[in-house]
Amino acid sequence: MSEALAIDVRDLTKSFGTRKVVDNFSIQVPRGQVWGFLGPNGSGKTTTIRMLCGLLVPDSGSGTCLGYDILRESAAIKRNVGYMTQKFSFYEDLSIRENLDFVARIYDVKDRRKVVDQAIEQLGLVRRQQQLAGTLSGGWKQRLALAACILHRPRLLLLDEPTAGVDPQARRDFWDEIHQLAAQGLTVLVSTHYMDEAERCDRIVYLAYGTVLARGTVAQVIGESGLHTWIVEGEDVRALAADMHNVPGIDQVSVFGVTLHVSGKDAAALERAIAPFRTRAGFKWQKATPSLEDVFIHLMAPFREQTS
Amino acid sequence: MFGISIARITAVFLKELIQMRRDRLTFGMIIGIPVIQLVLFGFAINSDPKHLPAALNVQDPSVYSRTLVRALENSGYFRIDHIISNEREAESLLAEGRVAFVVTVPPEFSRELARGDRPQILIEADASDPSAAANAIAAISQLPATVFNRDFTGALAPLRGTPPPFEVVVHRRYNPEGVSAFNVVPGLIGVILTMTMVLITALAVTREVERGTMENLLAMPLQPFEVMAGKILPYIFVGYIQVTVVIVAALLLFGVPMLGSYFDLSVALAAFIAANLAVGFTISTVASNQLQAMQMTFFFFLPSILLSGFMFPFRGMPDWAQWIGEVLPNTHFMRIVRGVMLKGNTLPQMFDDLWPLLAFMLAMMAIALMRYRRTLD
Ligand SMILES: Nc1ncnc2c1ncn2[C@@H]1O[C@H](COP(=O)(O)OP(=O)(O)OP(=O)(O)O)[C@@H](O)[C@H]1O
Ligand SMILES: [Mg+2]
């Protein structure tokens, strides 16, 4: 366990048919960090994670996970990685306990019974342990899956949208646990669509159409986007938003209830563009740092125009 | 295979057991199919096979024995493959199923014939498949009246005509009354096992793909052999349960005898079941959903029922069909079961059919392991 980088891959490329789904993907994740993996649907997050744990063979590129070669030592990687699939992939016709027991046996976990007992207790499912996994609600399935994939004390966690459909309290608990595990040296790569979760990561990687568009800490990603945002507060921001559509200098307008985010790439141009609107009564204008979401939507803008 | 873990095989094994127990439909099928097929196939299917292999046990070589060979072959029902001269050899040829008939010309046949003592020719027929033997036996019974007429010249001329100069004595071996159920019911064991074993494994693996649990299974440190072993073992037990059902029914309902040993039968069973499970596993590596797995199972099942000697007497089939039949595990297993139950055959006598079974099993397992996906690609 001496390697400093838990994940060190370079130029991973994967195509399905003629479509390049992941294009020259490289990351270096230091041990003990929590990295967020973001990107719109179909951007290649799942595909990338699958290549990292040996479920898909990259067309080209190379690298290591936990020091093991991803092409040649996938057996060793599988023993030391916990992979949580995006779609629930434990056995619905097995009970909660039976599922955990199965996993524990596969990984040859020591003190199997005790470890499984503990996991069930931690999940808070002691009284429902005989319930079939298929009858659990979506959120509980996610929590069971997470419990199952950390059962064997992996050194690297690859989590594919682990909190999709999970309630806020459970999500918070989940993230607290992630950080606890990270403090003990566990490395985590977690894909998510939630901005608040992205903000709890040490680093984020933003993927779109198979290419990394941004990476770094949240502040870095926001800073490097070169985006400038004004927040408008007022009664009828919706009407204001409609008027500001297609105004040169304003790249992006989005409504958040009673506030409006108006963003543009060029600070001066943006200021000129909004000047006529600022004279309208009943609105409070304020310069602000763009949110991560503003940045991501901005990053996606060129692609949206391309495809539509 | 490197680093096989018993613990991991056990994990898969236990999981399969639990899933099987919870899957009522499959469980019903395991018990239901034998019962239904037993009822359906309790009736015999008749046919008229020709050119059955036969041995001539000549204890008195003479012009008559040569005429007899020609006459038997001309009848169309016999093909004299072996000319032998002792009882022991005849016995083993018959027991191993290498010939369907042994025709014995007793010592002193020509002398007694000339004296007008009406000697007997003994026909021993393997009647474990009665429909296969019936017409041939009928054809033989026509022989005595005329067969030697051309040989009876000069002083022997009076022997022509009635009463026939010799008698034919037919011994139906292994199934003296010619009960078709005796043939069909043991054969049914092979048919039922082929159907359910192949299908069950094919579905068990394809189900993982269809339900998305395959991704998890592949992400775990499981080797293909461990998955295969864990998935095949529970169904070997299932196979034994089915065989027990059929044998009990065979004994009680149809009064089929069990002359051999259950131990010998279970040895052959293990190989046969494993061979079929390997076929199922191979199918599951090709099929992308349970429907396809089902279709492919039937693709394998049909020749196993039609060309194995279950539906039609094996020797009545055209050569190409026999070649295909020889490859199929059910063909060999069927011979083994009939041999054990009806003839009391023991392991050494099964050898001719046991090794093709084992060879098929190993080949199929190798294909299954090679084809088993290690990634999602
Ligand atoms: N086995 C496959 N065969 C063909 N195309 C595939 C396959 N798996 C994924 N794709 C395609 O690759 C692209 C990337 O898919 P991927 O699942 O990696 O996206 P994602 O970023 O995880 O999306 P989401 O946020 O919706 O989970 C998609 O357009 C998908 O259609
Ligand atoms: Mg995904």
Image: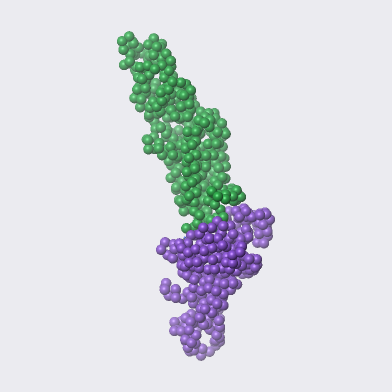
Chain colours: A purple, B green
* Rendering quarter of residue A91: bottom right
Quadrant containing the C terminus of chain A is bottom left
Q: Is residue B102 visible?
A: yes
Compared with A187, B22 (above or below) is: above
Question: On the picture, is B224 further left or further right than A17?
Answer: right
* Rendering quarter of residue A180: bottom right
Say which residue appears at 61% left-offset and 55% top-offset: A107
User: Residue B373 in the image: x percent, y percent?
Assistant: 49, 53
Compared with A33, B43 (above or below) is: above
A204 or B35: which is nearer to us? A204
Quadrant containing the N terminus of chain A is bottom right
User: Residue B247 in the image: x percent, y percent?
Assistant: 55, 35
Q: How many marks?
A: 0
Q: Is residue B39 visible?
A: no
* Rendering quarter of residue A288: bottom right
Say which residue appears at 36% left-offset and 25% top-offset: B73
Say which residue appears at 49% left-offset and 89% top-offset: A275
B83 or B157: which is nearer to us? B83
Residue at the limit of the structure toward the front, as seen here? A2
